[in-house]
Amino acid sequence: MSAAVALPVHQLSESPTSRSISIGPWLVTAATHPISNAAQSDALHARTGFPLPEMTFGANLLRLEYTPGWAYEFTTPGALDLVKNGELWLQSRTDPSSALPMPNTVPTKPYDWTYTTVYPGHQPSSSLAWTPADPENPAHTIPMSELTRPDPILFYAEIPLFEDELHDNGSSMLIVRIRVMPTFIFILARFTLRVDNVLFRTHDTRIYHTFAASPPLVLRETSGWEAPYDLLKRRLPQPTDLTPLTDPAFIARVLTTELPKRTSQRDGATTGWRGLGTRLEVLHLPQ
């Protein structure tokens, strides 16, 4: 704990399915429920138009509310809304000339069966616009030194939105995590994909707000990485132990820090995935 950081006034609340923290003009709510029941699944299926992931937490959500009039959410329906139009990718994987063909046991379906989503969260009602960050403005950067400082955690939540084992051909999952610290709010929403013997993919959305910002603003960084399966397999600590290949943290570490950006954020696994690269945006909050 850092002795230099004073604890701000805050209030914690809890119910059987949700937890929240009120701090300054902010109210943060994390709701976690069991896997969607039949009625909930039918309603969500009707909305998306394709089969749902095996483990769909349709009622889970993370919501930020800012008193002067702004809100931001991460929800399962919002994430699945962006899992569409997979036909082009599937066609490229099942073409006989493909360098990275899909496993023979996987049927071609009229949707992206990997459930890949580049969902960055959404504003449920506000029309405030995200604009490109100014690289010359120090306020438009996410300070890693502050994120790693051992200050006390006022509030933490982990909210799974969905997970699927891709018919035993890999894994696809989206998990949202939030930390509220004495000086800032930080969110990491991470989508992780493993298609056995084909590719790995990670898509991160980072949301950052410092309570000291004047005027108040929120930063949003979205980043996508991808690489062929064998590239990560060759980086296993023990070549005969494949366990790390099921660990999202190991996958993210290799994709984001061990592989050159040209490999993981430009070339990828030659799928043409639109999520590759990094974009940093800023939203100015009402005062």
Image: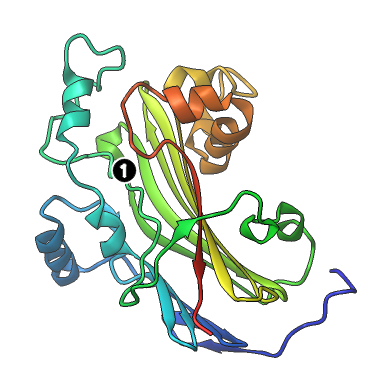
Across and down, in percent, residue 281 comes to 50, 56
Q: Residue furthest top?
A: 97
Work out whether residue 240 or residue 180 is closer to the camera in this orientation and state it: 180
Residue at 38% x, 71% y is 61
In the figure, is residue 241 to the left or right of 154?
left
Q: Amino acid at mark 1?
A: Thr
Q: How many marks?
A: 1
Across and down, in percent, residue 175 comes to 44, 56
Across and down, in percent, residue 224 comes to 45, 40
Residue at 39% x, 62% y is 121
The local secondary structure at tag 1 comes to: loop
In the figure, is residue 238 to the left or right of 37?
right
In the figure, is residue 226 to the left or right of 172?
right
In the figure, is residue 224 to the left or right of 79?
right
Split into 4 quadrants, where in the image is the C terminus?
bottom right
Residue at 54% x, 89% y is 13
Residue 227, visible in the rendered structure: no
Please identify the quarter of the rendering in which residue 178 is found.
bottom right
* Residue highlighted by disc 1: 116
Q: Is residue 20 above or below residue 164?
A: below
For the rendered model, the colour scheme is rainbow
Q: Is residue 261 above or below residue 282?
A: above
Residue at 58% x, 17% y is 239
Q: Residue furthest right?
A: 3
Please identify the quarter of the rendering in which residue 109 is found.
top left
Split into 4 quadrants, where in the image is the N terminus?
bottom right
